[in-house]
Image (cartoon, rainbow, N blue to C red):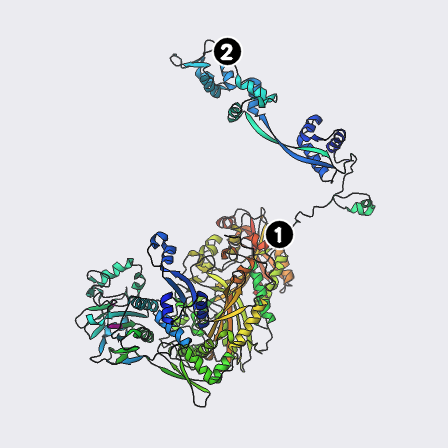
Amino acid sequence: MPTVSVKRDLLFQALGRTYTDEEFDELCFEFGLELDEITSEKEIISKEQGSVKAAGASDVVLYKIDVPANRYDLLCLEGLVRGLQVFKERIKPPAYKRVMPDGKIQKLIITEETAKIRPFAAAAVLRNIKFTKDRYDSFIELQEKLHQNICRKRALVAIGTHDLDTLSGPFTYTAKRPSDIKFKPLNKTKEYTACELMNIYKTDNHLKQYLHIIENKPLYPVICDSNGVVLSMPPIINGDHSRITVNTRNVFIECTGTDFTKAKIVLDIIVTMFSEYCEKQFTVEAAEVVFPNGKSYTFPELAYRKEIVRADLINKKVGIRETPENLAKLLTRMYLKSEVIGDGNQIEIEIPPTRADIMHACDIVEDAAIAYGYNNIQMTLPKTYTIANQFPLNKLTELLRHDMAAAGFTEVLTFALCSQEDIADKLGVDISATKAVHISNPKTAEFQVARTTLLPGLLKTIAANRKMPLPLKLFEISDIVIKDSNTDVGAKNYRHLCAVYYNKNPGFEIIHGLLDRIMQLLDVPPGEDKEGYVIRASEGPAFFPGRCAEIFARGQSIGKLGVLHPDVITKFELTMPCSSLEINIEPFL
Amino acid sequence: MADGPVAELLLRRLEASDGGLDSAELATELGVEHQAVVGAVKSLQALGEVIEAELRSTKRWELTSEGEEIAREGSHEARVFRSIPPEGLAQSELMRLPSGKVGFSKAMSNKWIRVDKSMADGPRVFRVVDSMEDEVQRRLQMVQRGQAEKLGEKERSELRKRKLLAEVTLKTYWVSKGSAFSTSISKQETELSPEMISSGSWQDRPFKPYNFLAQGVLPDSGHLHPLLKVRSQFRQIFLEMGFTEMPTDNFIESSFWNFDALFQPQQHPARDQHDTFFIRDPAEALQLPMDYVQRVKRTHSQGGYGSQGYKYNWKLDEARKNLLRTHTTSASARALYRLAQKKPFTPAKYFSIDRVFRNETLDATHLAEFHQIEGVVADHGLTLGHLMGVLREFFTKLGITQLRFKPAYNPYTEPSMEVFSYHPGLKKWVEVGNSGVFRPEMLLPMGLPENVSVIAWGLSLERPTMIKYGINNIRELVGHKVNLQMVYDSPLCRLDAKPKPPPTQEAA
């Protein structure tokens, strides 16, 4: 969930009133936001770097507000204020308008070289804008928030904003060999080639995270003006030449990316949020983008969409009984201008360009419910009549674990993920023989594979509890995972029961007795016949030679029991003899 | 008869004494170990008011074994001095004497002897004085005679430093007659025996009282794991509410069922390597229900079922990627898909509690695997009010009655609501679960009828368990680093029982 940080006093000034922290928290809760933290720059720095560094930092109160991940229109002060003011019916949602320029329209021409790397672009102009320090900071911060969220860390979309008065169109969006790109980037004093820049930014804490997007491509994307001045090398950095400042009056915005839909949404969000400060409020000057196939588009789209939803549908989905007029009013408070039309039961809803999150009628239903107030909805119980059933495997597991505890064994709960070493090397088995499922991106060795046996987890539990009085009698009934090409995903869980006895003597007879007890519980008699169970001398690398037996029940092998090999005991950092039992319980379903 | 010969003697002496007796003195008089007298005192004390005993501790100086040797044979330096004949002794020879090393340096510093290094056959030691006083021996003998008090503090501490003298604390009892004093006390029986029952002798015997303040002996027993005890209770609650358990025994899942089927777009951050464990082997799901996959693809890339869709290039390869399921909602999706194939539609209530996996940064409350609890109701015409009603009943069974609902965003539910409950201990509203109505873009491609709504909610199993059992670090609860003592000691899980009042906070 993105967090937006706004100056409290600025926020209250824009809202036209002040709130206590509790009142504002309440307002946020109602609207689906969360007042996450009340802090200041000074507090943040002193928390992260110590109070010495924080000396002199601003102690202006900041509100950190958690915003739902799909509400890009609330990612800056301007949007938050507009959303809350409309919600509280203090203002009407503004109408955003695209206007054609008096003179020539700004053009961005895409060449075909971009096709393989970053084929889409959209652009627009904010004309005669008036920044202040706070507005400017918010403008930069919004781009950062968009980059981190909808733009997927600039992989899908990257934003460039430029002082139009320093440039001369038409602009070209192309892709060149890195060695052929040379310009002075933002915040640097001289020109570098793209190759040099990629090297420099490897140590740049902010920019290094974006390098991978283009790093290994033969061509890098670049936008130039008609004089060859570089505006930006998306998605990495803008040129210094066209940098915007507090005094910039005309802003050229380009959004390039691999996802055309998202590039258009991002452009719409930026221009709707900041056209508030243009001389002609909420108007945006159009720009034209020409694609390699010759097709030309005018941006920003600022499309208003109309949806018609029946009032009774909203009432039915939420569980309320409001008149269509009231529902329209509720929706209008959520920034969705609505009116009752047709037979008086239909509501026509206008979805503004800021609400790309409204994809379906269900999104409209939710907004009506929010405006109505979730906590005002009458709670009722559904009349759904059903007979409950347990999942048979879990039912058997529940019964067995109680009787395992009654037999004097203590239940443990170990991880399903572990290292290759745990299930292979430490048990004297080669990893290729385990049929284990391997994880491709583990952050540490603890998450290399899914376990193929419960035994390592139990032995590790003993190792972590060596101070406990002996004997230790532990068990676990849980799933292991084995590759299996007969299932749709190629792997299958098996429900295993594993028990260990750890003491100064191996206690094979105790583990053997436990097996006899389990079989008694499962109503399996001892004996060679096909309904019975029997153990036969066997061997296994994890067991002491001559102290291992295979367990057969109802005609199939279900596991092994025995005294663990001293090598296994040592590798799990244990010192005492130990006997163990592990069986698959699924044949007893 | 009294409890052993010493006790008997003690009582006799006590009867004859006026006032009382000192246990140490009695031991000397009786010629027995002090410990034996102490034992007698304790056993008499256990009988009630027969005697009174007051513990006294006295400090005494005692010679160490080396000190006793010196009191007997003289200090090392004196022994060295005496062993030197008038013609002197080779230093090497002197050093071989038992007291040689220690005695030599002390005798030198006392200026009793000297070394002549000019001799042809090596250094030789001569007496300097004709006679000397062995002060060390004299002082130790004084201590032996019980006159340690006559020595100065400094002298005593010097002897102590040489490990010749030690201060011992002696605990003795001052024994006096108790209110029920008697010399003829009969031994009390400790336990009832089969013989006493058959002979009836129990009627004539006094029995030693039990100490009811002592702890009993815990039975040898096995124990269930606290988290799984809580899991059992949650299963019970769902079953009481008529919910059927879904199969969840598939940790490995395809991206399709984990994400795509839930209308979670392929660029969603949850599908990042940073958040999800992907599988290297088997890397891809072998089979997917292709008809359904086509409908999902269309809904994502073009929209449909009344939706705008996400309008992006949906890729089958991405959907085939195997992973460790990140939520049990993948199992719910499979269950709902199976339900959709049954015609005509029958309403259903489902639940599951099982492991899920996240490739997250680990801390005191986050592990790479945890348990998720999920409840689902599918029926015609379900409302948000129904969802809230079911949640109220569910949480009431957990002992949580004060609920509040906050609008939220989940990719696959709309409307969505986070569930908050008032925590009286923390004095604030805390999030206890997440819920919503599954999106039509998820349900309709499965083939569920259009007027069927599916409401669902979820929460983690670990969080309520940690609160219930007062555990702050999740590693102490889940995994091999668990503290078995905690498992042994954990009480029953009674979720609806009133929680213990929080300990009063001390003023900071």
Furthest-left residue in view?
Answer: A227
User: Mark 1 belongs to which subunit?
Assistant: A
Q: What element carries label 2?
A: loop
Q: How many marks?
A: 2
Name which quarter of the figure residue A262 lies in: bottom left
Label drawn at residue A509 = 1
Give the residues in magenta. A233-253
Q: Do the residues labelled 2 and 1 touch (CB within 8 Å)?
A: no
Label drawn at residue A522 = none
Instruction: From the viewer's side, name the closer residue of A262 and B264.
Output: A262
Spot occupied by residue A17 in the image (x, y as percentages of width and height): 40, 70
Label 1 environment density (alpha carbons within 10 Å; few <14, some 14–19, many ≥20): few
**Residue A416 in the figure: left or right of residue B299:** right
Spot occupied by residue A299 in the image (x, y as percentages of width and height): 28, 78
Residue under pointer 2: B131
Q: Is residue A399 visible?
A: yes
How far is the residue under mark 2 from the one under mark 1? 79 Å
Name which quarter of the figure residue A176 lies in: bottom left
Instruction: Identify which residue is drawn at 42% across, 82% down.
Output: B306
Is the residue at mark 2 from the same chain as the one at mark 1? no
Work out whether B30 lies above or below A574. Answer: above
User: Mark 2 belongs to which subunit?
Assistant: B
The prevailing secondary structure element of the residues shown in magenta is loop
Q: What element carries label 1?
A: helix
Q: Is A238 inside the magenta-drawn segment?
A: yes
Spot occupied by residue B313 in the image (x, y as percentages of width and height): 35, 75
Q: Is residue A527 visible?
A: no
**Residue B431 in the figure: left or right of residue A535:** left
Q: What residue type is labelled 1?
A: Glu
Work out whether A465 lies above or below B393. Answer: above
Q: What residue type is labelled 2?
A: Ser
Instruction: From the viewer's side, name the closer residue of A188 and B251.
Output: A188
